[in-house]
Image (cartoon, grey):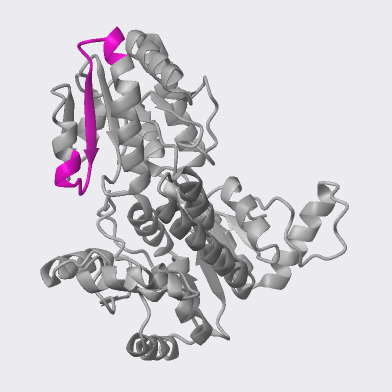
Amino acid sequence: MNGDEGRSPRGPRQLLWFSHLVPYPPTGGALQRSFNLIRQLSRTYQISLVAFNLQGDSGTRLLEYSHELKKYCDEVDVWELPVRWRSTRWWTRLLFSPLFPDPYTCRAFWSRDLLVRWRQTLRAHREALLHFDSPDLALFMPAASGFRKVLNHHNCESMMARRRAQQEGNPLKRAYLASLWRKLANLESNMGPRVDVNIVVSDVDARVLHETSPAAHIHVVENGTDSNYFQPLDKPQDPTSLIFVGSLDWYPNISAIQLLVRQIWPLVKARRPEARLYIVGRSPSKSLSRWLTSDPSVNVVANPADVRPWLARATVFVCPIVDGGGTRLKILDALAAGKAVVSTTIGCEGLRVKPGTNILIADSHEDFARETVRVLDSDSLRRELGAAGRSLVETAYTWEIIAGRLEQAYGCALNPDACASRRAEKRKTLGDAETSDSSRPTPRPTDPP
């Protein structure tokens, strides 16, 4: 997925990409999105990357990651967090976070010393467009007044916190999550109008952000997949196997796995006793692995060097996600690999999929198990779904296509007057009556014009 291509000659445009994590290796989620967009943008931008060592990687690994990133970035500067992520002190500060108005995810990145360092970085990149890759970096934004800025939302964080609060059974946890939801919604409301462009990954997230921050200028730049890296492979399949892929330390994936194994998997096994389930991903806890492998029909594949062979051997890809936000890169990767996919509605939320054509969607336990068994039993259905999914990726979700949409958003940030004129003309063409104020965002933000 890294690609061996070098950087082609580029124009003078400068991009300062400020990230809450080191976007390497591209093993899923924000890592995968950010790395691939940087790789594509390096063809037209001189990129300086400033990234936090969120995972606490060793110096040796950071040197390796920086070497790979310098294939696409002119500069790579990795900063340590003020307090190591998930250390005892980190958890202690989290415990007292309800006393502060800002979300702890923002305060965890900020310190006075780092603010001084950030100001020095800005002085060295006075002509650059600033890309903030997460709202977690909000406390650094006031120092960047006078710069053109875009803010990327990998997820609509307030919506995720609201969903978690609504589903949480523990009253104390529910109260904490409700407080976090309000803080995140306030953050999105305040930050949205302070940047030139807000970038979200789906129309669903755009509508939510527009409700939270009506004055925000929003562009949809969807997630994508590397269609050269993920391709249908001509390898033998385990004829009755399911696969779930995802970061195994991310709460929406953990809740999906629990639902799958406790509620859906017994229904599948009742109809196909020989079926096997593969849970594939990075960083599973010991307790999660121990619980899963207590069932001999469940296999845990932790931290695979390459997920593609596991995708190739599986009969059906399942995504019973019921929580979280954004869009699932895991589904796009599976579609690119030509796999038949069964998902919940939330699991494929925001993707341009068509139920029954390139994906099957089921929300009850019984329906999900029935659709899964239907795929296991039908070679022709698997081939039809796989081919249609691959076609969708090739026409809408390659990183080349997605990076083009991001460059359009950048163009809007750099030339807002021209962008406003294009949007007003687009509304006029579509017969929108609200054309009197071209600076207003459309009620339903869409892809950049």
Q: In x, y percent, where is residue 51? A: 32, 72
Residues 367 and 420: in front is 367
Eyeballing the image, is 83 above or below 272? Answer: below
Query: Is residue 270 a member of the stretch shown in magenta?
Result: yes
Position of residue 49 relative to residue 234, above or below, is below
Counting every numbered tag in the picture gives 0
Q: Residue at 31% x, 62% y: name it.
A: 23
Of residue 423 and residue 259, the one placed in the foreground of this image is 259
At x 14%, y 31%, the residue is: 293
> Residue 222: percent from the left, percent from the top?
51, 49
Q: Is residue 73 visible?
A: no
Which one is nearer the viewer's eye here, 237 or 117? 117
The picture places residue 12, in percent across and down from the top left corner, at 47, 77
Magenta region includes residue 363: no
The residue that appears at 37% across and 14% down in the rendered structure is: 375
Q: Residue extending furthest front?
A: 171
Q: Residue at x 82, y 49 (%)?
A: 429
- Left or right of residue 330: residue 188: right
Segment tinted magenta in the rendering: 268-288
- Location of residue 113 with respect to 438 vertically, above or below: below
